[in-house]
Amino acid sequence: MSMPKPTSACPALSISGSYEVRLSRYARVALSIPVLESGEELKAKDLLNADASQAEGRYSVHEHVRFVVDRGLVRGDAPLLVLGMRNSLVNLRAPVIWHGRPYAVAGEQPEMSLRPYYGLGLRDGSLVLDCALGDASEAASWLEFFCAGNPVLWDDARGDELFDLLLCETADHSHLFDIPRGHHHLANEATRALWSRLHVVFEQHLYSKQTVAAAAMRKVVSECVPPLSRCNNYFHAAIGIDSNGGLVCLFGNAQLEAIGQRLHTLGCHRGICVENSGSVTPTWFPSGLAAPGVPLVRAPNFRERGRAVVVIELDDDRFDSVPGCWSGNPHASVKIG
């Protein structure tokens, strides 16, 4: 039976939501990127034309967990929380440092960057948000791992300064601006050309100093006619760390800076966006691999397979519910551990 044809240009289903996961403590943390063992070349996904789901180097959540369990990085009989890092090794400006060595998509050489990458890393068994490469720490100092993301909250950066960071670190311009692309029902030749115009400048300044890259990106944005409007309904996943070292994970349809502000409200001073839309993957394994994982939140266009996830081992399978809010939107909040 063939699928019925839509009777309207607008979708029948609309989605909005927000979800918070807070982790007060953890036992061990492991990064799963099985493809690094094979050494195969990883192409950046085609953000412009499709849903960007090349098959190479992509694994299901269960396969990722099995990978780190088999290598003794976490226990297979302990409660596990999986957080996707599914922009890593998929987009430009999303490299990974693994045991002191940087990796990126084909065509990007992170060591050449004159500005730092912002990301989540593991140092001495503790998760941290910090900078790497550029004028920051060298790759060799990250003996465990570092995954770059998009800074939605970073120390005292506010307003234009934070927006400039996002302009220079966000490879998919549809995350910042209302520019339909790919299979979006509003995407057309004109919107794809506009997205490409921004991306050409982004690629030209892939390694430029922050001030130079920001000036170039602001210039091309200012030349767009009609003026670009900000995107406030894309589904994002972001990670922050509070003053006690606890992990704060936010998932929701919002402008990137609004997610950063929510992280700040929850006691964080730094936060990064790590995946978006159908890639958002938080999964809870209360019994480890003894039972299937419980998806905590998914988008309707969820894609099962990805290149990178973080697997966190806990000492407690209980959870608590805590009050949550997100700019007046419906919310759900879970505190684990």
Image (cartoon, rainbow, N blue to C red):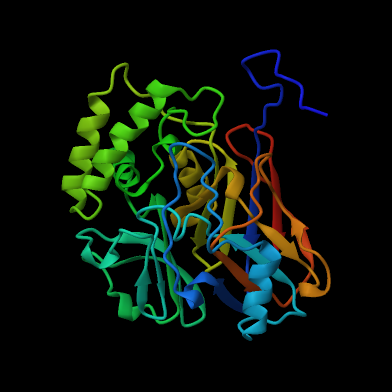
- Quarter of the image for residue 8 reads top right
Q: Nearer the viewer, residue 180 or 161?
A: 180
User: Which part of the image, by quadrant, shows the N terminus?
Assistant: top right
Above or below — where is 120 with respect to 325? Answer: below
User: Which part of the image, by quadrant, shows the C terminus?
Assistant: bottom right
Q: Which residue is drawn at the image coordinates 35% and 27% (left, top)?
A: 193
Residue 151 image point, x, y percent = 39, 51
Q: Residue furthest bottom?
A: 72
Count of all numbered marks drawn on residues in the image? 0
Relative side of 79 to 105, left or right: right
Above or below — where is 172 with respect to 2? Answer: below
Above or below — where is 23 with respect to 164? Answer: below
Q: Nearer the viewer, residue 231 or 309?
A: 309
Relative side of 175 to 301, left or right: left
Q: Which residue is drawn at the image coordinates 78% and 70% (left, top)?
A: 317
Residue 66 image point, x, y percent = 68, 75
Q: Is residue 59 visible?
A: yes
Relative side of 166 to 322, left or right: left
Q: Nearer the viewer, residue 328 or 314?
A: 314
Q: Which residue is drawn at the image coordinates 58% and 55% (left, top)?
A: 249
- Quarter of the image for residue 195 reads top left
Q: Is residue 33 visible?
A: no
Q: Which residue is drawn at the image coordinates 57% and 61% (left, top)?
A: 58
- Quarter of the image for residue 158 reads top left
Q: Residue furthest front?
A: 1
Q: Residue furthest top?
A: 7
Residue 25 image point, x, y percent = 63, 72
Residue 88 image point, x, y percent = 46, 59
